[in-house]
């Protein structure tokens, strides 16, 4: 359907993103000015369209829907002022809409025949007066809420409408905060958290094939998302500016994380339904072994520690040296014989308690938690905390797989939560010992750490590191 005229309505977005479904699998199309297109699982007609010459600069708007439905508008190569549209063959019959001489300028395609659109037509051929009207078929909860919340709202005041499965929808306007219904608890918490932090929601995209995945763009151009694990999250992130407080869904425990883009250490909240949360929670629960401390406490928050470039470089360099020496990957082991271990220490402030102040680390030198999070571990500080002068294996950085043991060493002051740090370590070749030596300054020659085994002196394991770059804070948890 040719588009001979088109108004610019809706918010100006940093990028355009839409999710649909084709052949039973979720699909997406992403267009970022200056970077071009990126997509997955598009119907062949649309995939061919976005690969046409000059389409990177000609694309105006698009929307994906279920069963391979799509709507796409672009500027004609022949005439930069002429708008053209392409659709899947059965789009208009599916929508049961003939547009009555008007042309669509915005469409949101949902499942089960739901859709929202905005059309434009010339009311008076002489004056060429343009009229714009929003209409479509929406879930009744959306209809009721929009009438009650925005009585008399005009189409140009609507920033976006997105419709997902299970009756989910989100509607945003330029007159206030968005409203929604039927969305997942995770998405609702994310929206409420960011709005309370003063971030205006500019666009939300739901998927007509899956209830759990979503895309959010804020007024500053940053983006939050929760997307399928088989989509290349890192490549998607290269097209947009990701929001700082949320960990991506794809996470692997032995991947080297990228350094902070801000130049300094940052905390990012971990989603409860993501792989990182499940990994950390399992280590915590499996490591809670003291019988008198049962039942296990509950983790309330997990934060990933995004290292500064300095901390990142130091760890990677040390890891490479240990791997080159021990050749662990050749023996089908984890590179550098890495491991995770718990570390309990003092937290004099309430870092992590208030999500709106997530990266406001305190400057108290006695707050070991903030010192470790921002500057990492330092073996020279071992044994200097009040009542912690005993060092079984000398001055070192101590970790344990036993979270309930690390719990003995944490002190969270006036916070409502206890805190622990989960450290990522490079063990290399461990010097295994059952008897302590308080004068140790390093493991025996040829070894890279000291591993205290359960038996003669120890009821629960511990691992000691004498090189600061062998250990980095990976996560902080709050629990009670």
Image (spheres, rainbow, N blue to C red):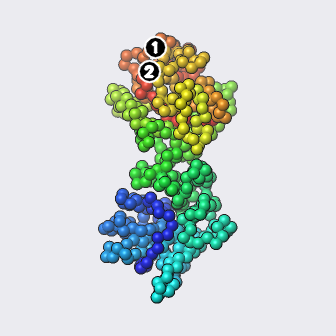
Name the residue: 66% across, 31% down. Answer: 414
How far is disc 2 from disc 1 in space, using C-alphas?
9 Å
As helix, strand or loop, the secondary structure at mark 1 comes to loop
Location of residue 364 by image quarter: top right
Q: Can residue 346 be seen by looking at this rendering?
A: yes
Q: Which is more toward the observer, 89 or 348? A: 348
Disc 1 target residue: 440
Q: Which mark is residue 63?
A: none
Q: Which is more toward the observer, 164 or 291? A: 164
Location of residue 302 by image quarter: top right
Q: Earlier in the sequence, mark 2 or mark 1?
A: 1
Location of residue 60 by image quarter: bottom left
Horizontal and vertical percent position of residue 377: 48, 27
**Dot 2 crowding, Cα within 10 Å, few <14, some 14–19, many 20+:** many
Name the residue: 44% across, 58% down. Answer: 14
Horizontal and vertical percent position of residue 338: 44, 31
Q: How many marks?
A: 2
Disc 2 target residue: 466
Q: Can residue 323 be seen by looking at this rendering?
A: no
**Dot 1 crowding, Cα within 10 Å, few <14, some 14–19, many 20+:** some
As helix, strand or loop, the secondary structure at mark 2 comes to loop
């Amino acid at each position: 359907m040719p588009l001979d005229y088109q108004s610019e309505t809706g918010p100006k977005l940093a990028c355009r993103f839409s999710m649909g479904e084709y052949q039973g699998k979720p699909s997406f199309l992403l267009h970022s000015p200056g970077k071009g297109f990126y997509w997955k699982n598009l119907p062949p007609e649309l995939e061919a369209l976005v690969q046409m010459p000059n389409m990177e600069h000609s694309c105006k708007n698009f929307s994906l829907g279920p069963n391979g439905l799509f709507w796409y508008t672009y500027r004609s190569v022949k005439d930069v002022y002429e708008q053209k549209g392409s659709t899947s063959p059965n789009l208009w019959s599916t929508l049961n809409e003939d547009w009555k001489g008007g042309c669509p300028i915005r469409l949101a395609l949902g499942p089960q025949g739901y859709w929202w659109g905005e059309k434009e037509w010339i009311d008076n051929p002489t004056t060429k007066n343009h009229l714009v009207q929003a209409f479509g078929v929406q879930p009744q909860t959306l209809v009721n809420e929009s009438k009650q919340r925005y009585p008399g709202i005009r189409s140009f005041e609507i920033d976006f409408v997105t419709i997902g499965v299970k009756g989910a929808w989100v509607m945003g306007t330029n007159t206030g905060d968005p409203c929604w219904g039927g969305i997942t608890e995770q998405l609702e918490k994310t929206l409420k958290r960011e709005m309370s932090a003063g971030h205006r929601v500019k666009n939300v995209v739901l998927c007509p094939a899956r209830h759990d995945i979503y895309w959010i763009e804020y007024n500053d151009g940053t983006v939050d998302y929760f997307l399928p694990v088989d989509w290349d999250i890192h490549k998607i992130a290269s097209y947009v500016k990701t929001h700082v407080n949320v960990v991506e869904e794809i996470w692997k425990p032995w991947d080297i994380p990228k350094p902070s883009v801000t130049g300094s250490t940052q905390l990012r909240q971990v989603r409860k339904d993501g792989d990182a949360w499940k990994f950390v929670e399992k280590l915590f629960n499996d490591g809670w072994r003291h019988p008198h401390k049962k039942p296990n406490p509950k983790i309330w928050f997990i934060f990933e520690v995004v290292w500064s470039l300095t901390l990142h470089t130091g760890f990677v360099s040390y890891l490479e040296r240990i791997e080159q020496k021990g050749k662990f990957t050749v023996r089908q082991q984890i590179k550098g014989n890495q491991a995770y271990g718990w570390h309990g220490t003092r937290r004099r402030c309430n870092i992590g308690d208030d999500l709106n102040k997530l990266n406001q680390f305190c400057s108290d030198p006695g707050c070991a938690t903030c010192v470790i999070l921002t500057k990492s571990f330092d073996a020279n500080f071992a044994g200097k905390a009040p009542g912690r002068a005993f060092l079984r294996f000398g001055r070192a950085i101590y970790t344990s797989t036993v979270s309930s043991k690390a719990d003995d060493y944490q002190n969270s002051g006036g916070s409502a939560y206890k805190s622990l740090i989960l450290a990522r370590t490079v063990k290399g070749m461990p010097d295994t010992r059952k008897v302590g030596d308080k004068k140790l300054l390093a493991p025996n020659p040829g070894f890279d750490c000291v591993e205290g085994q359960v038996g003669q002196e120890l009821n629960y394991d511990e691992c000691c590191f004498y090189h600061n770059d062998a250990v980095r804070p990976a996560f902080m948890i709050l629990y009670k």
